[in-house]
Image (cartoon, rainbow, N blue to C red):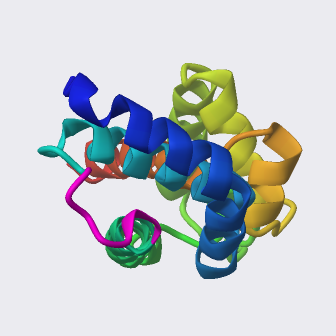
Amino acid sequence: MNYKNKDVVDKLVREHSSALVRFLTRRMKSREDAEDIAQAAYLKLYTLDDLNHLSNAKAFLFQVAANMSIDQIRREVLHKNYIDKETSKLPKDLSAMATSAPQTISLERELEAKETLHLVHSRLQGLPQNARQAFILSRNKGWTYTQIAQQMGVSVSSVEKYILEVLKQLRHVVAEVEH
């Protein structure tokens, strides 16, 4: 860490921390994400060459943080698009595979559906509690990622990671059944 910047960064934290978090919260729509980005911006300033030559350290801090928030938003959009793509490959309601089948379904197909449902259930039970909870709140309750994050006390990106983890596992189940 470049300790030449310690005094400059400490002063920026003392004088502009709350304003920076408010600025980032408006951009990110999440106070936790805003606080994370603000912290990362301060850490980045520590690693730069001597900041004493800056004519407006506050403006520089806000620009660094704004750029980091843009990067985060881009990553979230890419991640959301990936999750949407993966989700579209799965049935909307996995339990519908067993309960909404027509009466003319063959016994063999019914057994396959029950086996698939059993595999899905066992795979879900083997996942970490947070991933399972996020998935259930999303799919069964219809909650948004923001609502889930607030309920679980985690960031929205953590909820996205949890759900992505579950979707990957469920894709493996579907692939096992199809082969």
Q: Is residue 17 visible?
A: yes
How many numbered callouts? Answer: 0
- Quarter of the image for residue 118 reads top right
Say left or right for 4 vs 85. left
In the rendered structure, the answer to whether residue 113 lies left or right of residue 75 reads right
Q: Compared with residue 32, is residue 58 higher up or lower down, i.e. above or below?
A: below
- The residue closer to the viewer here, 168 or 147, is 147
Q: Which residues are magenta?
A: 52-58
Q: Write down the quadrant of residue 92 in the picture.
A: bottom right
The spot of residue 123 in percent (x, y) is: 52, 29
Residue at 38%, 63% in the rendered image: 57
Please provide percent x and percent y for residue 145.
69, 63
Foreground of the two, 150 or 174 = 150
What residue lies at 30% left-to-right and 71% top-to-bottom?
Answer: 55
Give the overall secondary structure of the magenta segment: loop
Depth check: give the residue in front, 171 or 178.
171
On the rendered image, what quadrant is the N terminus found in? Answer: top left
Residue 111 in view here: no
Residue at 30% x, 47% y: name it: 45
Residue 49: x and y in percent read 12, 44
In percent of width and height, residue 32 lies at 68, 51
* 166 over 59 or under it: above or below: above
Query: Is residue 130 shown in magenta?
Result: no
Name the one closer to the observer, 91 or 99: 91
- Residue under the image location 43 percent in, 42 percent down: 9
